[in-house]
Image: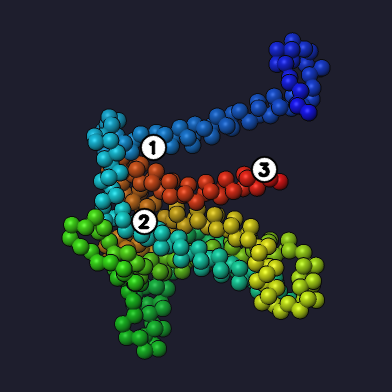
Amino acid sequence: MTAPVIDRAWLRRRPAATIPHGVKTSRRARLIFAPSLLVSFLFVYVFIGITGYISLSNWKVGTSPDLSLRQPFGATYGEIVGEQRFQADYRNVIIFTAVFLVLAIVGGLVAALFIHHVAIGKSLFRTVFLLPYALSFIVTGVVWRWIFAPSTGINVFLKAIGIQNPPGWTTDPSIVGAVNSIDIGSPLKIQLGIPVALLPIIFAAAWQLVGFAMAMYLAGLASIPEEHLEAASVDGANAWQRLRHIVLPQLWPSTITCFVLLLHVALKIFDLVVAMSGSGPGFVTDVPGIYIYNYLTSRYDKASAMALILLGLTLLVVVPYLIRGYRRERKA
């Protein structure tokens, strides 16, 4: 059967009291959501378009706006891609994101499994793990900056156990596991590897966000039917087999959600880095957020271009996630 076709002209001539309830509801919904959709379109998509145009323009200084298009077209993007600072920023944000996500997600999973099975003090442990999430990144950064200060904090302990030359941490410009050298004339102006100075920032961020991941996994664990675990026990499955074949597969949706939300935090990281190290020696701890902030008063075109590149990097992960969710809803 085909759906009935509604004659819109007939509906307009017909008295309101006789219009079908579903049609009136649809009209009311459009009127209610129209203002919010209009505001969202203006403050999101229109402003993204304006930012894109500024990134292609000659607007360099805020006091003298020049909205003429820069020649050759897209020259600002070519300029910043060839910069050492830009390359260091994206090396840092990729390394930070990858290691941070592993530490936060795995740590959250372990904490959730521990709290889910502990018999005494469950509320206490849950509060202890969640407490860091209530702090701001500035507070966390100040505390962890002291912990990893070269002359105090953890280095005092390292010297006490016999390590005479501990790392300088946030002041250390060295790269661990560098896979290349810097050649004169090469378009690649940085060493690819893990900056030592970035490690304290990663540890601080993971420490603060592991409670968030734990809360996500606790919700997922609560939704797993006990009958599945009991049936596996009856069949002779040990604790590891139950975890691997029953618990972890059913926690996969929680893992995906946690991954996407924490990815958003990692890509826009700014205040924690500012509080702990700033750009660091040789930009070893610089991130796109600091790059954009520094150029907002001198090079509007470069700041706008970096913002759009960061947006594109985010969309590379977020868009497939949204498409996947949309397809699952359609199948359901």
Q: Across the whole image, how many numbered discs are drawn on residues?
A: 3
Seen from this angle, which residue lies furthest front? 1
Q: Which residue corresponds to mark 2? A: 90
Category of crowding for the residue at label 3, using alpha-carbon neighbours closer than 10 angstroms: few (below 14), some (14–19), many (at least 20): few
* Amino acid found under the numbered disc labelled 1: Thr
**Residue 113 appears left or right of 139:** right
Which label number is shown at residue 51? 1
Above-or-below relation of 268 to 28: below
Q: Quadrant of residue 181?
A: bottom left
The percent position of residue 303, horizontal first and vertical second, equals 33, 44
Gap in angstroms between the C-alphas marked 3 and 1:
34 Å
Q: Viewer-nearest of labels 3 and 2?
A: 3
Q: Earlier in the sequence, mark 3 or mark 1?
A: 1
Gap in angstroms between the C-alphas marked 1 and 2:
20 Å
The percent position of residue 54, horizontal first and vertical second, equals 34, 35
248 vs 57, nearest the viewer: 248
Q: Viewer-nearest of labels 3 and 1?
A: 3
Q: Earlier in the sequence, mark 1 or mark 2?
A: 1
59 vs 8, nearest the viewer: 8
Q: Earlier in the sequence, mark 3 or mark 2?
A: 2
238 vs 38, nearest the viewer: 238
* Amino acid found under the numbered disc labelled 3: Arg
Q: Quadrant of residue 224?
A: bottom right
Q: Quadrant of residue 130?
A: bottom right
